[in-house]
Image: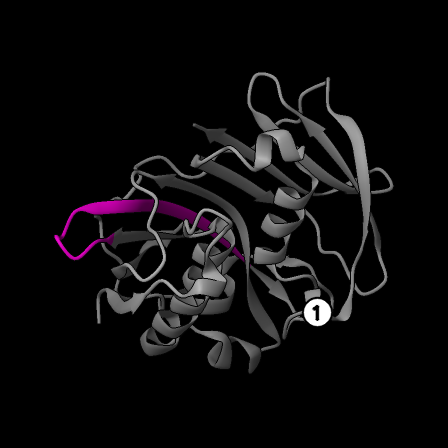
Amino acid sequence: MMSYTEEFSVKSYETDHKGNFKPFAFMNHAQEMAGTHALSLGFGYDQLIESGNVWVLSRVHVKFLKMPVWREELSMTTWHKGADRLFGFRDFKVTDKKGEDVILATSSWLVINHISRRVQRIESVLGDEMKGALSEDAIKEPAQRLSTPSNALFAGKRVVCLSDIDINMHTNNARYVEWAMDVISPKIGYNMVVKELWINFNNESLPSDEIDLYVSYDPEIFVEGKRGDSSIFQLKIISA
């Protein structure tokens, strides 16, 4: 199948204190759908792990055109857009029951060796097996590389726990979104509605790692997680 669609209603545990669909919840749906679709096309987790490789999410850009709410019925579609030497590109579109777009997203993925953790060239792993690419864009430009503002200040520390770890034995990408939301000032966090979100996943974090969190609020909300001098993730938010 050239694209893959799932329909679902927003669950209470996927919403925030206002009943809005959380970015964390979108990330969970996105990664699961990406895996299911890739598997059906012959280059999912089960196929890659046979050669000792796995997909990891590298960059994401999400536009929340209209924030879904609790119990709202949604349709979410994903498709892949091919690859360059290192990145595989995948887009997502979420529509409401009227068929109107409510969320648009684009993502960039890497293939890494499961043992060495080194990035692999996609063509060296998949050859010409990455079939089913579509030229349609939810967001035309690939998710950008982020640069941390010089005014970012230390805001807290997070220790990687068992509940953060996924099947790849590192912190799951969606958890970083929760970490970022938790470290934002309550005065801002409780009142904001996310309109646009960028995330870079720069390095893995592993069980018991201590991650220092830095936050900037000018010109946009920006959160970076670091282990020592190594950037683990960066996240930028435009909110209303």
Q: Nearer the viewer, residue 175 or 16?
A: 16
Q: Nearer the viewer, residue 194 or 192?
A: 192
Could you tell me residue 132's position as x and y percent? 25, 65
Question: Is 140 inside the magenta-drawn segment?
Answer: no
Q: Residues within 10 Å of mark 1 (few under 14, many from 20)?
A: few
Q: Secondary structure at mark 1?
A: helix
Q: Residue furthest front?
A: 18
Q: Nearer the viewer, residue 142 or 86?
A: 142
Q: Residue furthest left?
A: 98
Which residue is located at x 45 percent, y 46 percent? 18
Query: Which residue corresponds to mark 1?
Result: 163
Span highlighted in magenta in the image: 95-110
- The overriding secondary structure of the stretch rendered in magenta is strand
Q: Report whether residue 178 is seen.
A: yes
All told, the count of numbered labels is: 1
Q: Is residue 225 left or right of residue 91?
A: right
Which residue is located at x 72 percent, y 71 percent? 115
**Looking at numbered disc 1 in the image, what kind of residue is underneath it?**
Ser
Could you tell me residue 118's position as x and y percent? 68, 59
Quadrant of the rendering where the N terminus is positioned = bottom left
Identify the image quadrant of residue 4. bottom left
Q: Nearer the viewer, residue 105 or 10?
A: 10
Identify the image quadrant of residue 117. bottom right
Could you tell me residue 174's position as x and y percent? 57, 57
Question: Is 100 inside the magenta-drawn segment?
Answer: yes
Quadrant of the rendering where the C terminus is positioned = top left
Q: Report whether residue 123 is seen.
A: no
Which residue is located at x 66 percent, y 26 percent? 148
117 shown above or below 151: below
Q: Is residue 131 left or right of residue 154?
A: left
Which residue is located at x 12 percent, y 52 percent? 98
Could you tell me residue 168's position as x and y percent? 65, 71
